[in-house]
Image (spheres, helix red, strand yellow):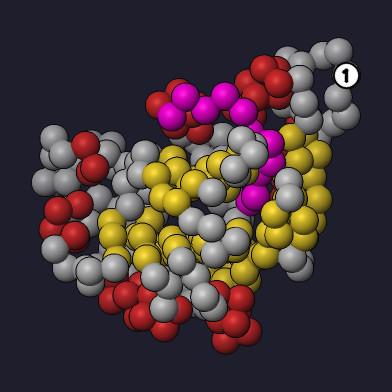
Amino acid sequence: MQLTILGAGSSAGTPVIACDCATCTSSHPRNYRTRCSSVVQLNTGENILIDTGPDLRIQALREQLTRVDAVLYTHTHADHIHGIDDLRAFCQRNRQQIPLYAKQDAVDHIMAKFGYAIRAPSHFWDLPVLSIEAVEKPFALLGQTITPIPVVHGRMMIYGYRIGNMAYLTDVSAIPETSFPLLQGLELLLIDCLRHEAHPTHVNLEQSLALVAQIGAKQSVMIHMTHELEYETLSSLLPSNVYVGYDGLKLNFS
C-alpha cells in the first residue's frame, strides 16, 4: 500500500496569510504546506482518504486523484472537514456513493452541518452523495482492517487510524495508555508536530519525538506543522529514522 501526504500543514497552512517570516517567504517547495490530509492507495487501486480539509480540491488536482472510495475522519475542526463538498467531484465521476467513518460525536456534527450530502444515490449527482457510519472498534473496509486509535486533542478525544502497519496520528496532545498497544509493530508512523513551543492542543517537537521513541515505528514522519518549522532546519534536528513530511510525499507500507 502507499500513503500520499496531501497536506502537511496546520490550520493556517504555509505560507500564512500576510506573514513575511523566513518559512513563508522561502522558495523551497517543501515549505509550501496545505492543510493536513492524506490518502491511502490500496494495492487493488482503491483510495481511502483521511480527512477532507479546505484544500482538498487543489490537493486532488496536484496528485491527479480521480477516485475516493471512503473517508476516515479524525475529528471535525474546520481544517480537517471543510473540504467535504469537494467529494462531489468523485461521486460525479465514478457514479458512486462515498462512505464516511468517524467517531460518534463527529458523525453527529457532520450530520448537523452537512446533512444535505448524506443521501442515497439517484440520477442526480450535483451534490455529494455520501453515507456515514460511527465506528469505535476495528472494522473491515475494502479488504483492510481499519483500527481507530483514540488520542487526546486538548479537551477532545479524537481518532487516529491504523491501516496495516501504518498509523496516522494528527492533532495529538497526548496518547492514552490504552492506545499504545494498538501502535505496536508499526512500519510507518505519521504524527503531529506543531511547532517548537508547547501548545495546549498539540504536541510540540520535543513531545512528538518522545512519542516517536515510545512507539518505536521503523520510520516516523512529522505532519501538521506550522510555519515556525522550516523544512531544512527541522530535518537537521531529527534522528535518522524520523523525517519531515511534505505535500506530495509518498510512503510505502504493508
Q: Residue 87 or 16: which is nearer the viewer?
A: 87
Residue 161: image location, x then y, percent: 60, 61
Q: Is residue 243 left or right of residue 109?
A: left
Q: Is residue 168 left or right of residue 29?
A: right
Question: What residue sits 41% from the left and 78% below the top?
Answer: 216
182 to 228, vertically: above or below: below
Question: What residue sits 73% from the left and 50% below the top?
Answer: 143
Say if the magenta span includes residue 69. Answer: yes
Quarter assignment of residue 75: bottom right
Whether residue 203 appears in this view of the structure is no
Question: What residue sits 78% from the left and 30% below the top?
Answer: 97
Q: Residue 68 or 176: which is nearer the viewer?
A: 68
Secondary element under disc 1, as helix, strand or loop, is loop
Q: Is residue 71 left or right of residue 230?
A: right
Instruction: Identify the magenta region.
Output: 63-73
Magenta: predominant secondary structure element?
Answer: loop
The residue to which callout 1 is attached is 122
198 to 244, vertically: above or below: below
